[in-house]
Amino acid sequence: MKFSLLSALVLTVSTASAVDFKTQVAPIFRTKCFACHSTTKKVKGKLALDDAELPKQIGPGKNIIPGDAAKSTMYVNCTLPGDDADVMPPEGKNKLTDAELDTFKAWINEGASLTGGAASPAAAPAPLPPAGGGVLKWTNTEGKTIDAEFMGLEGDSVLLKIPATGTTHILPLSKLSAESQAQAKAAKK
């Protein structure tokens, strides 16, 4: 039961994974995808893969489904036959190599972490629990709740650590209830 609650809240799993986003996946996006999918060049299909925009593409019902490359539209479209209308990149332009596809697939299947990877992960921010203590209840917009420690804010996302597993997760603040958003912002201070 706790796992199903957690999976409803989790956007991106971040901790140890074999594929490092910054050194292995981001370079693929820059060389193979940015010509059509970057805010610095152009944004086709409402798909921007810049670091600041990428979190919007990750999660249930989005282009990258953490833990399931086979259901991730971005990966599937990169593996379609060259003559398929939905193949990416289109018309055989700058097609991903087998090694790049393997890296992309492994990254997604490992949870599509934007912060973890083969390289030593950056030290997590020191826990900054609110006055009440470490483990708090966090509720998403659907009303599902988990117990987790506040680890910090990263842009428009909150880092929460599940004490039972020691796993840290990144969740967009917009996916949390108003009370949990306020709790995260208060904990930052």
Image (tube, rainbow, N blue to C red):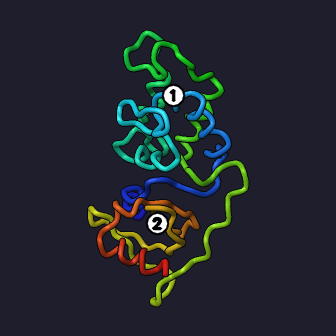
Q: State the residue in front, 125 or 71.
A: 125
Q: Residue at x 48, y 31 (%)?
A: 75
Residue at the farthest right position: 120
Q: Does dot 1 land on a helix, a strand or a loop?
A: loop
Q: Residue at x 34, y 43 (%)?
A: 61
Whole-percent x and y of residue 71? 41, 34
Q: Compared to 33, does 9 lie above or below?
A: below
Q: Quadrant of the N terminus?
A: bottom left
Q: State the residue in front, 109 or 1.
A: 109
Whole-percent x and y of residue 185? 42, 75
Q: Residues within 10 Å of mark 2 (few under 14, many from 20)?
A: many
Q: Earlier in the sequence, mark 1 or mark 2?
A: 1
Q: CA distance from mark 1 to mark 2?
A: 31 Å
Q: State the residue in front, 36 or 164.
A: 36
Q: Compared to 54, does 189 lie above or below?
A: below
Label number found at residue 35 = 1
Q: Amino acid at mark 2?
A: Val
Query: Which quarter of the picture shows residue 140?
Result: bottom left
Label number found at residue 158 = 2
Contact flag, marks 1 and 2 (Cβ < 8 Å): no
Q: Residue at x 72, y 51 (%)?
A: 119
Q: State the residue in front, 106 or 45.
A: 45
Q: Compared to 63, does 93 lie above or below?
A: above
Whole-percent x and y of residue 89? 49, 22
Asked whether, in this view, residue 93 is left or right of residue 139, the answer is: right
